[in-house]
Image: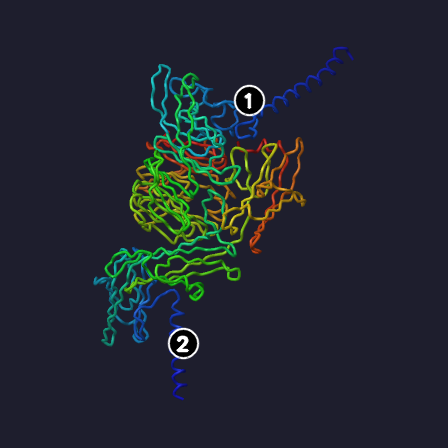
């Protein structure tokens, strides 16, 4: 009977604690007790950032109490029912003390304070094997199965206010709130997380908790990593000029010379060697397979017949030899109309 | 029917047919090949001025170097129509350009300094100097390096760093080259000119990105490393080892070097994905200082003035532009991508290509991919007063659609130069007319 009572009691307390943290969402409650607690948003503020501190009580009627707020000893506000304070943080390493004094109509006065350590933590990520063409200024996005490198960029201080090197912090990583999957990548100085984009879990959330050893300084953040579909884009490759990357062939090509070459650029395919020629390219003209250059399977060259006008459909299918989930297609119409080309080409 | 009438009836159609055939013949042969390997737009048969043709069309010889066809008159202008404030400087695609001061010799042999640009022709790699006064381009080098994608210039444009894709292997070539000047000036007379050349002095095979210092003496290179990337600075004029200023497990950085003491690194952008910008010192090792972060689709263009820059944000199918002043963001009077803007050296004004009615798309990704192009107007903003001004609307001065990239403002604030993304030709807009 006694054991059952303990189990029931423990379950109830656990449920209460779970609900409290679950419902608090992105907020972190400081000074958790049945009567009074703080909720800070954002939970780990950076330097010169606007911070909101909310006061919550389950034992005192705050709406009728006079609430006085202090930041580093300086009174900022004192009103009846003022349950929120907003202020701007200081520099990295600065410890901000937020205090509150509550006077209830019954004459009860309660004081409480919290200390915020100002630190920063950015999570940067890159799809380290995702291919984009040379000189492409955009981010290489991850397809299903891509390898992701997540790098933590903390800016934290120790108890004496000195910046602590990235390699001297303790990192605890989790994916979709599970730490066990990446436990071997967590630990002292482990500011890099390598993960594979799970084909069954396309949108992953990565979290990291960073602490300063032998200190109460602690911060955490998380990021969402989307999954994209690989795509193949076509560009004209002009003799002497190279690939004309500024003008993608979206739906049609009007040849500007007797011979025109088209190159395929497979965006976001996972290619650890960054060599796009390792993919499988299948070209077809009006549904009939056409060979590409053996050494350069991404390139096909068309001869433009004299004095003819018409449209030819050119299609391309690209497949990853090792990943069933990475493929893309593209189709364009090649317009053989030399006169029209002469009238419309921008040069 | 009289005999004369019969002859008239028979001969008249023949004459008319001959005239029509002549018209067609002349019209068809009006087309000519240019240095792009493509076919030029035909001229109007009646010889009317074609408002859509490049403004300085005809100043260049089509078959030879464009440097020997036109001689400037005494006031430094050609005898053609007055120059448009917004004009194409060179009718062929270029790999890059920079401001340059040229030497102009007048009829009396007196030399004066005049402003212009130095460009590298994309098809040949030949370097030309083009004055803003409308006179002929001068070929500086004749060494052929086709298909250069990026060119970085040192301060006296005597040395360059080029990046291109090797046609055969598909690999990147990153080469430092010395620009050996000939004796040419802009008199355009053959006896004054001896052709210069490019001489490769060193190459690198792991360059990811580059940025030149504001004084043009140094270049920052982001290099790929087994663990991520390293950043090096090196004096452009020297072929020595670079000085490593950081190493990072992260590779996808876009560098800017707007102030001598600060290099900015911004994460490569994609629509909706939070981006971050950090500043680093060219002299201190591994000192990253966060400038801004958590902004979706972040792109930046920092000014030469400390604490001042443009911040771009892009999410969904829209993008927005903000001014960053000492950590505080505020709106500008127009909306564009930061890299379509150029700062005055003192940070007093910013000049931007501003897209008119941009279509909904995934920005900036689709623009980078060439999936779409903008049609820009040119706007300016006075940073002190916040006054935005439309300087050249779309189609102004009979210009074709412009999608402005790589803009630069001259030190004296008189000229805005840029490349038109449509055809990669260089343009100038006179800011003070």
Residue B216 higher or lower than B21, as above or below: below
Can you name the residue that lies furthest to the left here? Answer: A73
The answer to which image quadrant residue A109 occupies is bottom left
**Badges 2 and 1: C-beta atoms under 8 Å apart?**
no
**x and y percent of residue A216 in the render?**
28, 65
Distance in Å between CA atoms under marks 2 and 1: 88 Å
Tell me residue B125's x, y (percent): 46, 31
**Residue farthest top in this picture:** B3
Q: Is residue A140 visible?
A: yes
Among the 4 quarters of the image, the one containing residue B258: top left
Residue B227 numbered tag: none
Crowding at dot 2, Cα within 10 Å, few <14 / some 14-19 / many 20+, comes out as: few
Q: Nearer the viewer, residue A97 or B377?
A: A97
Q: Is residue B47 above or below residue A126?
A: above
- Answer left or right for B245 relative to B378: left
| Residue that badge 2 annotates | A15
The kind of secondary structure element at disc 2 is helix
Tell me residue B321's x, y (percent). 40, 46
Q: Chain of mark 1?
A: B
* Label 1 CA crowd tier, 10 Å (few <14, some 14–19, many 20+): few
- Residue bearing the label numbered 1: B47
Task: Indicate whether B190 appears above or below B147.
Answer: above
Q: Marks 2 and 1: which is nearer the front?
A: 2
Q: Position of residue B269 (x, y in %)?
A: 43, 49
Q: Is residue A4 depicted above or below A261 in this figure?
A: below
Q: Nearer the viewer, residue A251 or B95?
A: B95
- Chain for disc number 2: A
Q: Quadrant of the N terminus of chain A?
A: bottom left
């Amino acid at each position: 009977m006694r054991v059952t009572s303990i189990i029931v009691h423990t379950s109830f307390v656990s449920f209460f604690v779970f609900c409290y943290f679950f419902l608090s969402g992105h907020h972190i409650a400081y000074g958790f007790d049945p009567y009074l607690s703080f909720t800070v948003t954002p939970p780990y503020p950076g330097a010169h950032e606007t911070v909101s501190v909310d006061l919550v009580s389950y034992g005192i009627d705050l709406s009728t109490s006079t609430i006085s707020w202090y930041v580093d000893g300086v009174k900022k506000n004192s009103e009846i029912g003022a349950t929120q304070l907003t202020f701007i943080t200081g520099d990295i390493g600065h410890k901000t003390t937020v205090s509150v004094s509550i006077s209830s109509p019954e004459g009860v006065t309660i004081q409480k304070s919290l200390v915020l350590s100002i630190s920063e933590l950015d999570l940067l990520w890159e799809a380290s094997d995702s291919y984009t063409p040379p000189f492409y200024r955009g981010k290489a996005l991850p397809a299903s199965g891509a390898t992701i490198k997540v790098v933590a960029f903390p800016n934290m201080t120790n108890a004496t206010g000195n910046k602590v090197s990235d390699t001297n912090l303790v990192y605890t990583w989790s994916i979709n709130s599970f730490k066990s999957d990446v436990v071997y990548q967590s630990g002292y100085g482990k500011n890099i997380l390598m993960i594979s984009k799970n084909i069954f879990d396309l949108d992953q959330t990565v979290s990291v908790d960073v602490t300063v050893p032998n200190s109460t300084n602690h911060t955490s953040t998380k990021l969402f990593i989307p999954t994209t579909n690989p795509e193949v884009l076509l560009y004209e490759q002009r003799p002497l000029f190279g690939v004309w990357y500024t003008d993608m062939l979206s739906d049609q090509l009007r040849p500007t010379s007797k011979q025109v070459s088209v190159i395929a650029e497979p965006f976001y395919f996972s290619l650890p060697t960054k060599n796009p020629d390792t993919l499988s390219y299948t070209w077809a003209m009006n549904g009939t397979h056409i060979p590409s250059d053996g050494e350069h399977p991404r390139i096909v060259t068309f001869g433009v017949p004299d004095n003819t006008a018409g449209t030819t459909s050119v299609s391309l299918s690209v497949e990853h030899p090792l990943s069933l989930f990475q493929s893309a297609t593209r189709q364009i119409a090649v317009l053989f109309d030399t006169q029209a080309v002469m009238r419309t080409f921008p040069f | 029917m009289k005999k004369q009438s019969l002859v008239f009836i028979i001969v008249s159609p023949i004459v008319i047919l001959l005239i029509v055939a002549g018209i067609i013949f002349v019209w068809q042969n009006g087309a000519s090949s240019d240095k792009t390997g493509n076919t030029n737009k035909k001229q109007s048969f009646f010889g009317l001025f074609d408002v859509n043709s490049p403004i300085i069309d005809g100043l260049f010889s089509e078959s030879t170097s464009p440097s020997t066809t036109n001689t400037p008159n005494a006031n430094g202008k050609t005898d053609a129509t007055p120059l448009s404030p917004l004009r194409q400087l060179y009718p062929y695609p270029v790999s890059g350009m920079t401001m340059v001061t040229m030497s102009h010799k007048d009829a009396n042999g007196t030399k004066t300094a005049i402003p212009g640009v130095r460009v590298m022709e994309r098809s040949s790699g030949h370097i030309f100097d083009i004055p803003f006064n409308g006179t002929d381009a001068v070929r500086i080098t004749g060494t052929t390096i086709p298909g250069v994608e990026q060119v970085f210039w040192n301060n006296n444009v005597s040395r360059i760093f080029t990046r291109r894709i090797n046609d055969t292997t598909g690999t990147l070539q990153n080469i430092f080259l010395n620009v050996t000047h000939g004796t040419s000036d802009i008199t355009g007379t053959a006896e004054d000119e001896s052709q210069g050349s490019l001489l490769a002095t060193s190459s690198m095979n792991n360059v990811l990105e580059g940025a030149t210092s504001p004084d043009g003496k140094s270049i920052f290179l982001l290099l790929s490393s087994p663990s991520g990337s390293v950043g090096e600075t090196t004096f452009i004029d020297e072929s020595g080892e670079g000085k490593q200023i950081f190493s990072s497990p992260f590779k996808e950085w876009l560098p800017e070097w707007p102030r001598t003491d600060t290099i900015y690194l911004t994460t490569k952008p994609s629509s909706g994905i939070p981006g971050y910008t950090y500043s680093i010192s060219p002299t201190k090792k591994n000192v990253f200082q966060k400038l801004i972060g958590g902004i979706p689709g972040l792109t930046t263009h920092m000014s030469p003035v400390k604490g001042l820059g443009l911040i771009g944000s892009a999410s969904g199918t829209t993008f927005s532009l903000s001014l960053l002043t000492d950590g505080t963001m505020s709106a500008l009077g127009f909306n564009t991508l930061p890299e379509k803007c150029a700062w005055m050296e003192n940070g007093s004004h910013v000049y931007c290509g501003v897209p008119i009615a941009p279509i909904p798309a995934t920005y900036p990704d689709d623009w980078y991919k060439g999936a779409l192009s903008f049609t820009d107007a040119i706007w300016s903003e006075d940073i002190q007063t916040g006054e935005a001004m439309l300087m050249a609307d779309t189609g102004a001065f009979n210009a074709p659609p412009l999608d402005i990239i790589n803009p630069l403002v001259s030190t004296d604030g008189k000229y805005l130069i840029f490349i038109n993304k449509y055809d990669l030709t260089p343009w100038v807009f006179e800011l003070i007319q």
